[in-house]
Amino acid sequence: MNMERDFKLGVKFARELDGKDELKSYRERFYLGEDELYFDGNSLGACSKDAEESLLEMLEIWKKNKILMWNIEDGKYFKYPQYLGSLFVPLVNADANELTVTNSVTINIHQALATFYKPTKERYKILVDELNFPTDIHATISQILLQGLDPEEVLISVKSRDGKNIEEEDIIAAMQDDVAIALLPAVMYRSAQLLDMERITKAGHEKGILVGWDLSHSIGSVPHDFKKVDPDFAMWCTYKHVSAGPGSNAVLYINKKHFGMTPGLAGWHGNKKETQFLLDHKHTPGPDADAWLTGTPNMFSMAPIEGILKLINKAGIENIRKKSLLLTDYFIFLIENRLEKYGYKNGTLEDHKRRGGHIALEHDEAYRISLALKEKNVIPDFREPNVIRIAPVALYTSFEDVYKVVDILEEIMLEKSYERFSAERMLVV
């Protein structure tokens, strides 16, 4: 285990860690409920004052400028997708013109596959994994069907050996000569396993396979280096660790070596900016990632990204990662020393190189415990079959918060308060 220090039991030690926390001042920038312990930032990040200010500023720009807003500030808002994309450069180490903010993750998967999936008799299969978030698989199957092919024959799903993680060796072994594209998650949404993107992408390229990544569960908590990884394409949402708000627009990355390709899904905002308003029915794609834009940008769904990304970049993604790992190390320590006797178990890999920003807390009664936690003003989420996901987000979670949630998890078991809740699943868990 990659512990940075020896941990101790007791709230005094948690407060000592908070006293040394170089990011503690950022907590006041977020709206956190009184006596609320928010641990669901891996699903929907807490609202920040910075995101709020950017959204309100966009409303003011619309109110004041109306249609003229597209021309102010040297065309900033007309070129807003790539401007916002540039704010992600420190998080992924890509060129600014390889990044654009648009659509949702699902539509960006459709866009990437519609562009890059060109099946032939020799290469027609798509490689995924059985633990990926469903939308990635739904979109992939949809694109296979649009090609008139049978998903049962085309889709290769790498199996998990333990139901929690995917071994990189198994992914690489599945990269056979008939595979055209691999689409994989950087971090597994349930277990928080972090894959070695560089190793897998290199192996794919050696076999002539295009490799794309979904960073939805890693972006904002794990730094990436696309100069080293060299993915062909990638996409990610902005409402989890990035905290840009429910349904905020996603990001699409297109490796510059693919600039000049015809986008699979064309739209007028993907046209060259210089001729976009000529309204020619012949589509002329832009010269960079903006070629993959489609319709008019959703400015109110994009504006909060500006505020929160500036805050994240001020804090520094490397600093965020350092604290995130320390928070999750501390939580694992408390699980092992205080909670295991109640049937709780850490379901997340302990190696820092293989772990994202949340913990999969396992228990046979995980669903009912998650409801008991919410009753006590602790907000996690539940994932089938037995996982309570706990995300201590570095910018607004304290070490004392982690200590308190462990107190409550213990209390729930001592009181057996979870038994008052039905095991029947609610609509949103």
Image: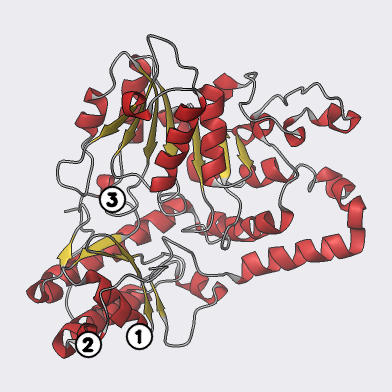
Q: Earlier in the sequence, mark 3 or mark 1?
A: 3
Asked whether disc 2 touches disc 1, contact meaning CB atoms under 8 Å apart, the reply is yes
Instruction: Report the front residue among 199 and 371.
Output: 371
Mark 3 to mark 1: distance in Å? Answer: 29 Å
Find disc 3 in the rendering and name its residue. 355
Find disc 1 in the rendering and name its residue. 375
Residue 231 in sight from this viewpoint: no
Vertical position of residue 338 compared to residue 50: above or below: below
Find disc 2 in the rendering and name its residue. 417
Label 2, residues with CA under 10 Å away: few <14, some 14-19, many ≥20: some
The residue positioned 32% from the left and 78% from the top of the image is 371
Q: Earlier in the sequence, mark 2 or mark 1?
A: 1
**On the picture, is 78 further left or further right than 29?**
right
Disc 2 residue type (three-letter): Ser
Check the image and name the residue furthest to the left.
341
In the rendering, at what x and y percent does residue 220 appear?
47, 53
In the rendering, at what x and y percent does residue 103 appear?
62, 45
Vertical position of residue 365 compared to residue 253: above or below: below
The residue positioned 34% from the left and 44% from the top of the image is 132
Residue 381 in sight from this viewpoint: yes
Query: Which quarter of the image is occupied by the N terminus?
Result: bottom left
Mark 2 to mark 1: distance in Å? Answer: 10 Å
Disc 3 residue type (three-letter): Arg
